[in-house]
Amino acid sequence: MDYTSMTLPNGIRLIHASVDSPVAHCGVVINTGSRDENPDEQGMAHFIEHTIFKGTTRRKAYHIISRLEDVGGEMNAYTSKEETAIHASFLCEYYERTIELFSDILIDSTFPEKELKKEQEVIIDEINSYNDTPSELIFDEFEELMYEGHPMGRNILGTPELVRSFQTVDIRRFMAENYHTNQMVICSVGNITAKKFFHLAHRYFERLKTSLRHDRRSRFSDYQPKQKTVEKGTFQAHCILGGEAFDVHHPDRLPLVLLNSILGGQSGNSRLNLSLRERNGIAYNLESSYTAYTDTGTFTIYFGTDPENLDRALTLIDREIKLLQHKALGEIQLSKARKQLIGQLAMSQENHEDLMLAIGKSMLVFNKVESLEEIYKRISQVTAGQLMEVANRILEPQNLSCLIYK
């Protein structure tokens, strides 16, 4: 797939991929997330993601919601540790309607106090709902454990007390300090020419004044492994085992992606799934995951099991880790693992909404998008020796933290 990119005079980057489909996907990805908040702003990035749809100088909340839904489209948003995204799916004939709407809510949102009060209660309900779901809550608490004392460890949703304190003036200050034009990417996948997409983006976003970010985020550099058990009174024991991993720029990032796929990725034939579920029948929900950030990363293994099987599950996981550390994959095993990851990546590009967000984030972080062919080539060059080396660096027992709910 071919991608075309350009940069607007105010620093906003654009990237587009043309596809033959009646449905298009477009978004704005901003290099601002929860790690950019001050201690008294925890939850602000997520709060803005909710309230940016609540009114502009031209539209009330209802008109924003209806603008795309009236023509069969849908709009959504998300906040992560490092980015905020607003995105939409719609019929291709409504490209201009969508981009104009994006510009309206990003440039002219008014954040009326009446709407803020209502949304504060919605978010607090979201926080309470999350607290009732240990299989989700444990991931946030694990990062709090790992990144203790650093903005990376803060919960994205914030706290009820802080969320209730946010006012319009606080939102405007945070956006002025963190929403910079050279840290924004407008990304698109749809049946439209790059020239027309660039024209529309320029038309509706040129009025956003140039604002460049020069400072760097506070780098995390003091990881210390920790062990913690929390009595939750749940029917299942929930456990996360993991530690610090490679950042997005690290040369061994792709070998770790492949290692994760082998150990506990999304496929049913991952080593952890075969060991804990298929052979021993002691876990239904289990996975390993690798998240790379701009200056650090997290590798985790999660599972839920009956409390009486907790120690056995940890023993089986330790066995699989040691095998990866001390026994090199044979050429047939390695070839299968490479092909499996390549196939998964190829299929992920068939989902054009995911593709749109992926190229937007890639442009934001790397200022480029690699072709599938380039990625396939790099995966095919990963060796068994590299996988063993990465397994020994990332999965060394004394470097792993462990959080248990039971």
Image: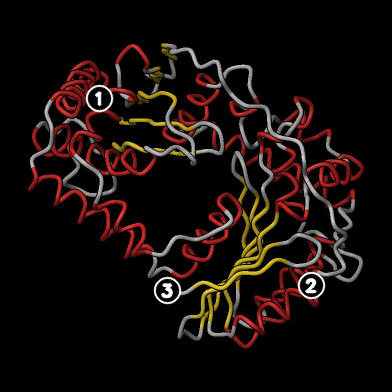
Residue designated by label 2: 63
Kindly identify the amino acid type of the residue bearing the numbered disc 2. His
Disc 1 or disc 2, which is closer to the eye?
Answer: 2
Relative depth, front residue between 298 and 52: 298
In the picture, the disc for residue 236 is: none
Sequence-earlier tag: 2 or 3: 3
Q: What coloring was used for the rendering?
A: secondary structure
Kindly identify the amino acid type of the residue bearing the numbered disc 1. Asp
Relative depth, front residue between 91 and 355: 355
Residue designated by label 1: 306
Q: Residue at x 27, y 58 (%)?
A: 342
For residue 159, side relative to residue 80 (left or right): right
Residue designated by label 3: 1
Q: Quadrant of the C terminus?
A: top left
Instruction: Judge whether 330 appears above or below 139 on screen.
Output: below
Q: Residue at x 59, y 43 (%)?
A: 80
Kindly identify the amino acid type of the residue bearing the numbered disc 3. Met
For residue 12, side relative to residue 89 (left or right): right
Circle 3 packing at 10 Å, graded few (<14), some (14-19), many (20+), is: few
Tell me how far mark 2 sits from mark 3, CA to CA. 36 Å
Q: Quadrant of the N terminus?
A: bottom left
